[in-house]
């Protein structure tokens, strides 16, 4: 098979309108990054890697769960949608994976760039009506406790006092307090000792 000598390729046409990178690009404004990082770059020497390009690549890694920087560079090199988001044409080179480590622990940390970017993105979402501020959500991870079930004891606290104790000590599930007919919450003996009153003094 004989290959063509010339190709006419438009990267814009090959990224669908409903692709996630287009939705992400709509709410990301990176126009002020270069001015924000200008004091951290030298005026002499070789041209530096564009900080906006590195930031866009890092956002792709966070958004699509690509934790390895080496693999992130490979994905941007192969994926047309990623190249479109990073403003890389087909003949443009992808930065080396070691560049991210040096900038993440150097310029980006010293200039507090990622925090500035996060706050600007949240502000943009507020202006678009995606964030109202009426409620907040906290992400948490469930960790299996290394506790002995044979040495547990039922809690003597109920109602409002139990909710206050749960908020104070943290990590105590409050589902049993809100679900009708649920059995009382159980605590280990070490925790119960911290929730009971001393005979001649205040609670520990």
Image (cartoon, helix red, strand yellow):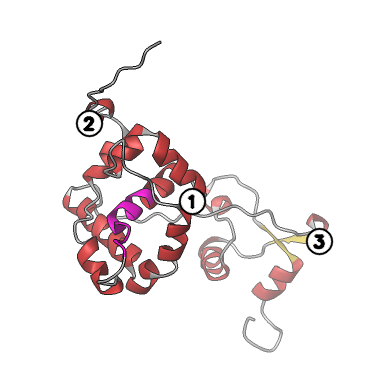
Quadrant where the N terminus is found in the figure: top left
Residue 139 in the image: state x and y as whole percent. Answer: 47, 54
Is residue 182 visible in the rendered structure shown here?
yes
Give me the residue at 83% from left, 56% from top: 150
Q: Which secondary structure lies at badge 2?
A: helix
Q: Which residues are magenta?
A: 46-57
**Residue that protrudes farthest toward the top in the picture:** 1
Q: Which secondary structure lies at badge 1?
A: helix
N-terminal of the pair, mark 2 or mark 3, is: 2
Q: Nearer the viewer, residue 23 or 37?
A: 37
Q: Which secondary structure lies at badge 3?
A: helix
Name the mark nearer the viewer: 2 or 3.
Answer: 2
- In this rendering, is residue 27 above or below 36? above
Residue 3 in the image: state x and y as whole percent. Answer: 35, 16
N-terminal of the pair, mark 2 or mark 1, is: 2
- In this rendering, is residue 8 above or below 166? above
Q: Nearer the viewer, residue 3 or 167?
A: 3
Name the disc covering residue 12, or none: 2
Q: CA distance from mark 2 to mark 1?
A: 26 Å
Where is mark 1, residue-wise? 69
Where is mark 3, residue-wise? 151
Q: Is residue 147 magenta?
A: no
């Amino acid at each position: 098979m004989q290959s063509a000598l010339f190709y006419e390729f438009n990267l814009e046409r090959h990224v669908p309108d409903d692709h996630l990178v287009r939705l992400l690009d709509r709410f990301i404004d990176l126009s002020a990054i270069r001015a924000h990082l200008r004091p951290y770059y030298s005026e002499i020497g070789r041209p530096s890697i564009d900080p906006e390009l590195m930031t866009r690549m890092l956002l792709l890694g966070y958004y699509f769960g690509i934790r390895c920087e080496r693999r992130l560079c490979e994905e941007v090199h192969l994926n047309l949608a990623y190249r479109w988001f990073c403003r890389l044409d087909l003949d443009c080179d992808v930065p080396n994976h070691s560049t991210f480590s040096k900038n993440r622990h150097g310029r980006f940390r010293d200039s507090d760039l990622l925090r500035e970017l996060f706050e600007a993105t949240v502000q943009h979402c507020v202006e678009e009506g995606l964030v109202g501020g009426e409620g907040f959500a906290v992400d948490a991870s469930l960790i299996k406790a290394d506790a002995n079930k044979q040495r547990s004891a039922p809690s003597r606290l109920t109602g409002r006092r139990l909710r206050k104790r749960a908020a104070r000590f943290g990590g105590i599930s409050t589902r049993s307090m809100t679900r009708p007919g649920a059995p009382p919450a159980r605590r280990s003996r070490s925790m119960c000792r911290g929730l009971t009153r001393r005979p001649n003094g205040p609670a520990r």
